[in-house]
Amino acid sequence: MTPFKNYEPRGVIPACLLPFHADLSIDEESYRKHLRDVTAVKGISAITVNAHSTEVASCTFDEQRRVMGVTMDEIGTRVPVVHGVYADGSLEAARIARMAQSAGASCLLVFPPNPFTLGEQSRPEMALTHIKTIADACDLPLIVFQYPLAGGQGYPLDTLVKMAEQVPSFRAIKDWCSNPMLHEKQIRVMQSRTPPVTVLTTHSAWLLSSLVLGCNGLLSGSGSVIADLQVALWEAVQANDLQRAREINDRIHPTVEVFYADPFVDMHNRMKEALHILGRLPQAHVRPPLVKPTVAEIERIRAAMNKAGLRQEGGLQLAA
């Protein structure tokens, strides 16, 4: 049973990373410390696990269940937990949803299945069936992950509206449409509904620009490293303090330049390296097919952490 009944996703929601040992087994001790570090940030509204940032594509069902078990054991009722639902089949997605609810999740983040790349946008009933199958399997609110339309996994706005009409537990989208005009339209349409469907931005590469359009929150893997700066930026935007928001964004910008550089697929690898540089993780192993950043790139990450004013544990300045 979830300790946060009737949770409504909004505000700052960091997506946690998942540390591994050198043999690529889960490093539970380091994961527990990472959870304590992230949840100690005042102002976050929830955390996310078993998502892109935790390399969910390389984790078995049993590993996902163990990650959730460790999460709940470590943070208990401290903050709500959003659990990813990453599966190509709707029945497997429903199984993950049931597991997450029984383990204590407060909300689900539903990824689009990979088969959608072959033509889901012309068959909206596929998307509706997938979401309904998950909704019928549990009592948790759903966040639907909105991908760019160009890749075939994004949902046309009309489909999102139909989801809102037909699935009462659909409470938010994690918006990665990568189109500022569509992003603003989704904010205006979805958040003006009754009841509203919250737009949580994950446009972390242009976070300030996105937030000022009126998002009701953000859900981001870079929150695993800079949750405090994201909270500060969110609060400044909510207070309509543009000068303060721009100052905070100037500190965030160096991290953006290294985390979200090409190739985009390496973003969470780079965040792990950042946490290792900052002394928050003892090592930065990733599971294949992901690969470790080059030595030169790691040095660029170190320089970016310095430029952003981030310090090692204990307040030490990073080595040059």
Image (spheres, helix red, strand yellow):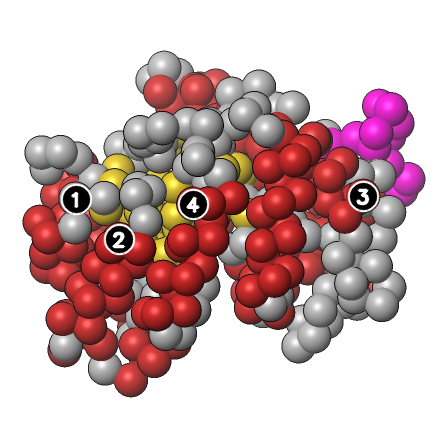
Q: CA distance from mark 4 to mark 2?
A: 11 Å
Task: Please tell me in which quadrant of the rendered image residue 275 appears.
Answer: top right
Specify which label sits upstream in the sequence, 2 or 3: 3
Q: Quadrant of residue 118?
A: bottom left
Q: Residue at x 25, y 62 (%)?
A: 133
- The three-letter amino acid code for the residue at tag 3 is Glu
| Label 1 or label 3, whichever comes before in sequence order | 3
Q: Which residues are magenta?
A: 310-320
Question: Disc 2 residue type?
Answer: Ala
Q: Which residue corresponds to mark 3?
A: 29
Q: Is residue 298 above or below residue 76?
A: below
Residue 268 position within the rendered picture, expressed as x and y whole percent measured from the top left: 63, 56
Residue 272 locus on image (x, y percent): 72, 52
- Asked whether the beta carbons under mark 2 and mark 1 sit within 8 Å of each other, the answer is yes
Q: CA distance from mark 4 to mark 1?
A: 17 Å
The secondary element bearing badge 1 is classed as loop
Question: Which of the image's four quarters has the N terminus?
Answer: top left
Image-quadrant location for residue 182: bottom left
The residue under label 4 is 101
Q: Work out whether 226 lies above or below 257.
A: above
Residue 117 falls left or right of residue 132: right
